[in-house]
């Protein structure tokens, strides 16, 4: 499924669920925040959806078994010049690391019988690693910009609700005679509820974004390090 289609479907479902919850499940003091509460609920649901989706993707990117054991077995096979077994291990493991390694090893296996210089072989293997890495990394970074965007939008939406609530409060105070205490209280309540909702969604988005960005950076560094080690082993053999 394309990212745009996925986000559109999720956005529509979040609006439906948020409206249903707002109408039938929320306590009255939260509903007093007005329709802006629905927007904040949509943003919060999208935060949760992206967090779950990214968590599943990161888990899948690690492969089927322990990466440490996978790398240990694969490096041992490469050092023994058993490239076919190394590729089989990558096929069984799957995941980002295995996909990148398999691309480089398959390229090396293809050109090993060609009359190429050592430097040319290394260059070809590195290019295969780089191309595979360029294909895998966008999958790990998908929807992270969505989390960052939600963190920004949620703050602004909360501020919008705060402003609307304060307008209502000042209108109650501006009436002739005694201020309308009920409208004043509703305006202040609306302002504070939207402020709290906006901050909650923004905090969730920021924390999740930084967490997953750190995961992606760590994963990228590990893939680059392993790729360089494989190239060094192949270079030493040649």
Image: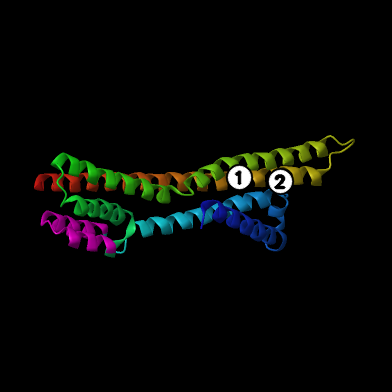
Q: Which corner quadrant of the image does residue 155 belong to?
A: top right
Question: How busy is the neighbourhood of tag 2: few (under 14 within 10 Å), some, or many (20 plus)?
Answer: many
Identified at 66% across, 44% down, the residue is 192
Question: How busy is the neighbourhood of tag 1: few (under 14 within 10 Å), some, or many (20 plus)?
Answer: many
Label 2 sits on a secondary structure element that is: helix
Can residue 62 be seen here? The reply is: no
Q: Is residue 146 above or below residue 25?
A: above
234 sits to left or right of 206: left
Q: Which residue is mark 2?
A: 190
Identified at 75% across, 43% down, the residue is 187
Q: Earlier in the sequence, mark 1 or mark 2?
A: 2
Q: Which residue is mark 1?
A: 198
Identified at 62% across, 53% down, the residue is 41
Residue 34 pos. (x, y %): 73, 49
**Magenta residues (range):** 67-91
Residue 123 pos. (x, y %): 22, 41
Is 110 inside the magenta-drawn segment?
no
- Main secondary structure of the magenta stretch: helix
Residue 160 pos. (x, y %): 68, 40
Label 1 sits on a secondary structure element that is: helix
């Amino acid at each position: 499924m394309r990212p745009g289609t996925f986000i559109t479907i999720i956005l529509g479902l979040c609006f439906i669920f948020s409206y249903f919850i707002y109408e039938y499940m929320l306590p009255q003091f939260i509903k007093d925040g007005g329709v802006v509460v629905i927007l904040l609920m949509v943003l919060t649901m999208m935060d949760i959806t992206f967090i779950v989706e990214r968590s599943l993707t990161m888990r899948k990117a690690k492969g089927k078994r322990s990466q440490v054991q996978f790398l240990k077995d694969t490096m041992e096979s490469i050092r023994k010049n058993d490239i076919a077994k190394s590729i089989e291990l990558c096929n069984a493991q799957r995941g980002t690391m295995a996909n990148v390694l398999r691309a480089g090893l398959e390229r090396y296996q293809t050109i090993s019988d060609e009359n190429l210089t050592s430097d040319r072989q290394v260059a070809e293997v590195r290019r295969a690693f780089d191309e595979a890495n360029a294909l895998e990394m966008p999958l790990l970074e998908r929807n992270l910009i969505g989390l960052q965007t939600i963190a920004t939008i949620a703050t602004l939406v909360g501020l919008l609700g705060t402003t609307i609530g304060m307008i209502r409060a000042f209108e109650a105070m501006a009436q002739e005679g005694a201020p309308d205490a009920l409208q004043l209280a509703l305006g202040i309540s609306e302002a504070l509820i939207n402020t709290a909702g906006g901050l909650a969604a923004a905090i969730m988005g920021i924390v999740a974004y930084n967490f997953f960005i750190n995961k992606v950076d760590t994963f990228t560094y590990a893939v680059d390090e392993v790729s360089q080690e494989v190239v060094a082993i192949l270079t030493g053999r040649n």
